[in-house]
């Protein structure tokens, strides 16, 4: 495995790991464990950034005039990034809401 195929798998792997951490963070929020949720969001963001860096490498190739082959695997990888980004936004909002409510109770 090499080239775009390898990059696609890296994107899928990092985005999937990130999504799992965000979902686990939402569960921690529901349980009231905001410290755990914050740590999971941070870890999820690290993985999410890895996916974005891999994706950016493809964009840079295209910008440099090298044609990037679009195939089903790359489409799937991009879908994984986008769905993970949506979950990230929702998790960030849920955590901010929970933190604000926790401050009111103190």
Image (spheres, rainbow, N blue to C red):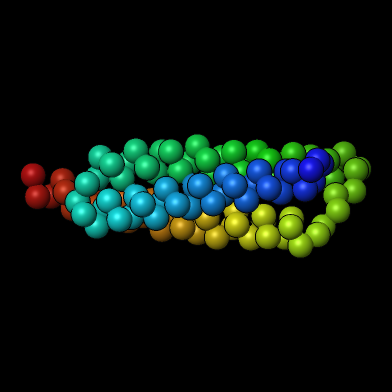
Q: Nearer the viewer, residue 5 or 53?
A: 5
| Vertical side of 3 occupied by 78: above or below | below
Question: Is residue 60 found left or right of 31 in the rendered image?
Answer: right
Q: Nearer the viewer, residue 103 or 91?
A: 91
| Vertical side of 5 occupied by 46: above or below | above
> Residue 24: where, in percent of width, then height?
36, 52
Q: Report whether residue 58 is seen.
A: no
**Residue 6 position by quadrant:** top right
> Residue 75: where, in percent of width, then height?
72, 60
Residue at image x 26%, y 53%? Answer: 29
Which quadrant, please, contains the N terminus?
A: top right
Question: Is residue 70 found left or right of 101 in the rendered image?
Answer: right
> Residue 7: where, in percent of width, then height?
73, 43
Question: Is residue 45 found left or right of 106 in the rendered image?
Answer: right
Q: Report whether residue 1 is seen.
A: yes
Residue at image x 61%, y 44%? Answer: 51
Residue at image x 57%, y 44%? Answer: 14
Residue at image x 31%, y 51%? Answer: 95
| Vertical side of 8 occupied by 72: above or below | below
Which quadrant, please, contains the C terminus?
A: top left
């Amino acid at each position: 495995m090499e080239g775009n195929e390898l990059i696609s798998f890296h994107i899928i792997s990092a985005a999937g790991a990130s999504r799992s951490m965000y979902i686990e963070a939402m569960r921690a929020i529901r349980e009231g464990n905001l410290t755990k949720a914050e740590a999971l969001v941070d870890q999820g963001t690290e993985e999410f950034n890895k996916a974005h860096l891999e994706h950016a490498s493809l964009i840079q190739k295209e910008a440099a005039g090298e044609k990037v082959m679009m195939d089903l695997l790359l489409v799937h990888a991009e879908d994984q990034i986008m769905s993970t980004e949506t979950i990230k936004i929702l998790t960030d909002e849920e955590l901010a809401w929970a933190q604000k409510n926790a401050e009111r109770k103190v």
